[in-house]
Amino acid sequence: MKHRVRAGMLGALVAVAVGLSGCATPAGQERMVDRDMSQHRAAAEVNTQLAAGYMREGEQKVAMEKIRRALAYDPGYAPAHHVHALLLDELGEEKEAAQAFRRAYRLDGDNPDLANNYAGFLCGQSEYDRAQTLFREAYSDSLYDTPEYALLNSGRCYQQAGDKGRALEQYRQAIDKGAAQPGALLGLAEALYETGAVSEAAEAMRRYESRHRHTPRSLVMAIAIDKALGDDEALANHRLILRGRFPDSPEAQAPKQGGS
């Protein structure tokens, strides 16, 4: 199963300065053009913010209307292309999403949030080398406030590609940077388990449980570790939590997980 590796999906979207081109114009006309361009940029910004908000609320149709309006006001506004790419990806329009990501990156290639999201998209398309290059751009940026998210996504991408060793490295770095965030701890447990380091996986799971509430996915991992260690008491407890807290989840319905 492919991991969804986007993080900070609607994070800081930084505007790109777009210069005017063409023949020289009289001063009065220049001021008019500047005012029009400023108004168009402001309208693009507002509509991009609205689109991002509607995306967060699950209103994709309205979000698409707003982002198309933003692009109509200012086709050179990089954050609009960024949000457009994320929305298209969410809607399963992969070819169009790839085009929108490329446009955004051409306009704003120094934006680590964009690099992280674009890399996540590329990883989902199995373009692993290109994805890791962009993840590296993001987490190596000294001005990036949340490099742990790019490291976490990089680890997931390596894990998806079957490179468990590199995945472990990235998860550990993400934990060092991000105060033991749940995704990194769970990813670490999964990667350790997959490499046969069951005792270390159990320790990572204990760290996860001491800081975060379980999800169906984390409980499936905990159950697998319990079975590998032959810990019947922990196994019964994790199965009870899975059935009690997430009774309608596919994980709880699976006989090997929910158990009887």
Image (cartoon, helix red, strand yellow):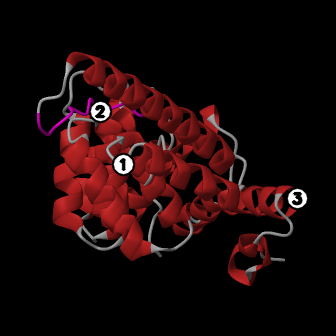
Local secondary structure at mark 3: helix
> In this rendering, would 244 be left or right of 173?
right
Cα distance, mark 1 to mark 3?
A: 51 Å
In the rendered structure, find residue 75 and report the number of the disc placed on it: 1
- Determine if residue 195 is in view: no
* Magenta region: 12-23
- Residue toward you, 13 or 5: 13
Cα distance, mark 3 to mark 2?
A: 50 Å
**Residue 248 placed where, x, y %?**
85, 70
Dominant SS of magenta comes to: loop
- Determine if residue 228 is in view: yes
In the rendered structure, find residue 225 and report the number of the disc placed on it: none
- Disc on the earlier residue, 3 or 2: 2
Task: Give me the residue at 49% from left, 64% from top.
Answer: 88
Queried whether the magenta region covers residue 41, the answer comes back as: no
Task: Give me the residue at 75% from left, 82% from top.
Answer: 255
> In this rendering, would 118 be left or right of 50?
left
Give the farthest residue toward the bottom.
255
Read off the residue under disc 2.
16
> In this rendering, would 129 be left or right of 120?
left
* Amino acid marked by disc 1: Pro
* Amino acid marked by disc 2: Val
- Disc on the earlier residue, 1 or 2: 2
Q: Are marks 1 and 3 in contact (CB under 8 Å)?
A: no
Read off the residue under disc 3.
244
* Amino acid marked by disc 3: Gly
- Are there few (<14), some (14-19), or many (20+) residues within 10 Å of tag 1? some
Local secondary structure at mark 1: loop
Queried whether the magenta region covers residue 17, the answer comes back as: yes
- Are there few (<14), some (14-19), or many (20+) residues within 10 Å of tag 3? few
Q: Quadrant of residue 165?
A: bottom left
Task: Give me the residue at 21% from left, 23% from top.
Answer: 142
